[in-house]
Image (tube, grey):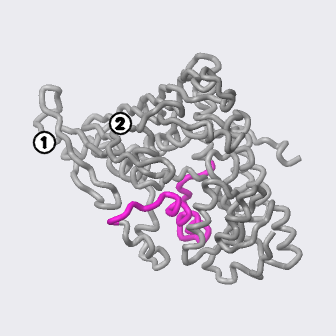
Amino acid sequence: MYKNTNTNNTSNTNCVSIIVIGAGLIGPRHAEHVVNRPNTSLFAIVDHSAKGPSVAQRFQVPLYKDLNELFEYCDKYNVKYPDAAIIATPNHTHVPLGLHLASKGIHLLVEKPLSPNAQDSKTLIEFCKEKNVKLLIGHHRRFNPYIITCKENLPKLGQVVAVQGTWTLCKPDSYFEEKPWRSSQTLGGGALLINLIHDLDNLQYLFGPVEKVYAELLMKQRAQRGSDVNAAVDEGAVLTLRFANGICGTFLCSDNVVSPFSFESGTGENPTIPFNDEVAGFYRIFGSHGTLSVPDFKLYHQHNQPVRSWLNPVEEHQVKMAFEVQKEIEVEEQDDVVMFGIATPDNSPNTKEDNLFSHHSHVSSEKPKPFDLQVDHFVNLILGKETEVKCSGEDALRALLCIEAVGKSIETGLPQVVPSIDDIEMNMELFT
């Protein structure tokens, strides 16, 4: 542990002190934004791995091996607890850490998935409500300009009828060797829980809750070629989906094929995965007035034709990104436009006239970073500048319930109805 020389990191009520738990891939990215913001301070790094010391030294903050050590230090030296925590640790640790932090009144940004199972997730959600703790889940793609642009342009499609999605790439064996939990289904490993859950959250964010799912596992190639990693977890699946509003869809997920058709490749979101700016159609959204392809944002329509018909040509229009221009074309038949009742959330760092967010003033020429916008939103929630959580515990639980329904469909060979979050009970054993 490095000595904490700060006696009170939040003497300024407009400054939020934050700890980052986890020094792996994601934690340092969060920490970097926290230290660069004008109204946040990085209180400490909490990590027991070999990476912890170098990350703490990089940001010149204290390092604690666990929460007990941090709280003992604060109590001993009368140091105010941090206001908030970002949990970027293995999936199975999210809820125990979250419960410990929430018991101290510390607000939480928890990386997805909230936990490997629905009952534990429900427990943390309800406990945070009881303790009046803000809970934001790190489905950061809700803040991605590609998703923002997609959602803003849905009205141009009229009544959305169907969606087709793909997430396909190839993870090397080193990915699993680096973090053994990634090869354990009980600890939250596998392509479905690590990767598919992102896209299911995207789709539910765009179209509302999924009510029924059917899934078939893909063949396991790693086991066939004799690899001893990832033998216990899935390599992906093919899904059919039915949403509560009647939209139907298909989705292909695989982490062991050579392909550029993934969110990361098509958007450049993950700096470790090469950006392919020619990728088209990892999402295709079909509507009564047109079809939208993402991430290339080709809008196919017949707005200038006297009647929508296969006898008339389909026109192509290039939709610009949301941070470049707000509206490009309007659907002529406004009465037929369906909004689904899902409001596009305010992207507060880009709309608030606040000097605190001047570091986003250049978004017209550069894509905003989803992780940064997510932390901005988290801080806004804590300071009371925003009240509606853009990815709540309930949102994350719905995505997890979809994944669990996928698993049950694979086990039974039958379609599964996705349970309501109201039907999920808390796991009281977590408090014993």
Q: Which residues are magenta?
A: 364-393
Front in this rendered view, residue 326 or 169: 169
Give the residue drawn at x 47%, y 34%: 168
> What label does residue 284 carry, if any?
2
Amino acid type, label 1: Asn
Location of residue 231 in the rendering, given as x and y in whole percent from the top left corner: 67, 27
Residue 357: tell me if it is visible. yes
| Image quadrant where one finds the N terminus | bottom right
Task: Specify whether 220 is left or right of 431.
Answer: left
Would you place residue 324 above or below residue 250 in this image?
A: below
Would you place residue 188 above or below residue 143 in this image?
A: above
Which element carries disc 2, helix, strand or loop? Answer: strand
Location of residue 119 in the rendering, given as x and y in whole percent from the top left corner: 73, 39
- Residue 77 figure quarter: bottom right
Front in this rendered view, residue 243 or 168: 168
Give the residue drawn at x 65%, y 39%: 176
> What label does residue 15 carry, if any?
none
Front in this rendered view, residue 37 or 303: 37
Label 1, on which residue? 304
Q: Is residue 276 magenta?
A: no
Amino acid type, label 2: Arg
Location of residue 129 in the rendering, given as x and y in whole percent from the top left corner: 70, 56
